[in-house]
């Protein structure tokens, strides 16, 4: 990244201006122990406005919880405008599961329940946002939000603003290094934290973020995929498959437009 300090200043000023225009008091951020939420919460903290960090465990791996809390402690030590709550959502999640009818669609149920975790967290973020008149700051990056759609619709995709959504994943790491985000977070394999087996993003997608970024850039300059190796084409196909199947997340919801002559 050419100028991480300029990127940081630009995002912080953008956040400040948005907050001032919206007449809202501060930000609430879900902190997971991953790189994206660590960078987003730190950028919000640098605005000087109140920032509420929420650590929301649902059957979480201990190392994810410890990284999240270590980051929050680091933020609170360096920014007096930061506070936090640790909300244990596991009992709520388990109660929800017990209330569901039985199903034989076991694989689909696992995916549905993974997304349910994200939606419970979204509801929690908006509870506190409404309570304090805060904005929910999203933590998605450009690859996830506009490339492969690797997020939960109305879960971690349900936010008020997206400070880092124009940054590629590698650029997020560049900003994290500039911000001195704790090393355990910078070194941790990216994961959405929605699965009981602690699977990584790469295990779910099939390629890593460097490869996804390459595919995004390559398709832009070489849409015909001319001259690519079979392995490179395979990487692009993985990218395209996710992009196509997740268009419903990345595009506005369809609206049935009624012919005007039917109405007046």
Image (tube, rainbow, N blue to C red):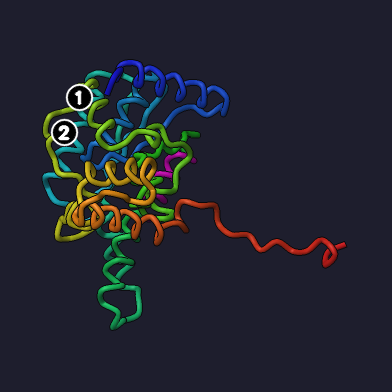
**Residue underneath mark 1:** 177
Which residue extends farthest right? 264
The residues bearing labels 2 and 1 have C-alpha atoms spaced at a distance of 8 Å
Give the magenta-colored segment's residue range.
119-130
- Res. 228 mark: none
Residue visible at 45% across and 25% down in the picture: 15
Q: Which comes before the other along the chain, label 2 or label 1?
A: 1
Residue 155: x, y in percent?
39, 52
In the image, residue 238 lies at what x, y percent?
28, 57
Judge whether residue 127 can be spotted in this image: yes
Residue at the image point whose x is 22% and y is 40% from the top: 34
**186 drawn magenta:** no
Residue 140 visible (yes or no):
no
Image quadrant in which the C terminus is located: bottom right
Relative depth, front residue between 107 and 95:
107
Q: Secondary structure at mark 2?
A: helix
Image location (x, y in percent) of residue 107: 26, 73
Secondary structure found at label 1: helix
Instruction: Look at the picture and state if 250 lies above or below 104.
Output: above
Of the pair 104 and 148, the residue shown nearer to us: 148
**Do the numbered discs 2 and 1 sit on residues whose CB atoms are within 8 Å?**
yes
Q: Residue at x 27, y 49 (%)?
A: 227
The residue tagged 2 is 186
Residue 127 is one of the magenta-drawn residues: yes
Question: Nearest the camera: 56 or 225?
Answer: 225
- For the N terminus, the quadrant is top left
What secondary structure is the stretch in magenta mostly built from? helix
Residue 11 drawn at (x, y percent): 40, 24
For this view, does 258 lie left or right of residue 175?
right
Quarter where residue 184 is shown: top left
The image quarter containing residue 50 is top left
Query: Residue at (40%, 34%) from the top-left corner?
Result: 166
């Amino acid at each position: 990244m050419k100028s991480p300090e300029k990127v940081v200043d630009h995002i912080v000023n953008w956040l400040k201006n948005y907050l001032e225009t919206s007449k809202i008091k501060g930000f609430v951020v879900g902190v997971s122990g991953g790189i994206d939420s660590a960078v987003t919460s730190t950028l919000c903290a640098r605005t000087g406005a109140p920032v509420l960090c929420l650590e929301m465990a649902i059957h979480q791996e201990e190392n994810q919880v410890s990284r999240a809390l270590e980051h929050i402690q680091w933020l609170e030590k360096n920014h007096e405008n930061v506070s936090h709550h640790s909300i244990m959502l596991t009992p709520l999640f388990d109660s929800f599961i017990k209330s569901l009818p039985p199903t034989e669609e076991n694989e689909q149920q696992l995916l549905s329940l993974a997304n349910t975790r994200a939606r419970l967290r979204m509801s929690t973020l908006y509870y506190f946002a409404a309570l304090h008149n805060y904005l929910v700051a999203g933590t998605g990056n450009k690859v996830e939000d506009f490339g492969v759609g690797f997020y939960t619709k109305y879960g971690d995709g349900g936010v008020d603003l997206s400070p880092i959504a124009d940054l590629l994943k590698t650029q997020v790491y560049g900003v994290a290094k500039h911000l001195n985000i704790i090393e355990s977070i910078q070194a941790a394999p990216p994961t959405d934290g929605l699965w009981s087996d602690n699977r990584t993003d790469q295990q779910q997608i099939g390629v890593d973020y460097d490869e996804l970024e390459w595919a995004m850039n390559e398709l832009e300059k070489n849409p015909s995929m001319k001259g690519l190796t079979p392995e490179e084409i395979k990487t692009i196909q993985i990218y395209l498959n996710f992009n196509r199947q997740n268009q419903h997340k990345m595009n506005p919801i369809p609206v049935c437009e009624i012919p005007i002559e039917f109405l007046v």
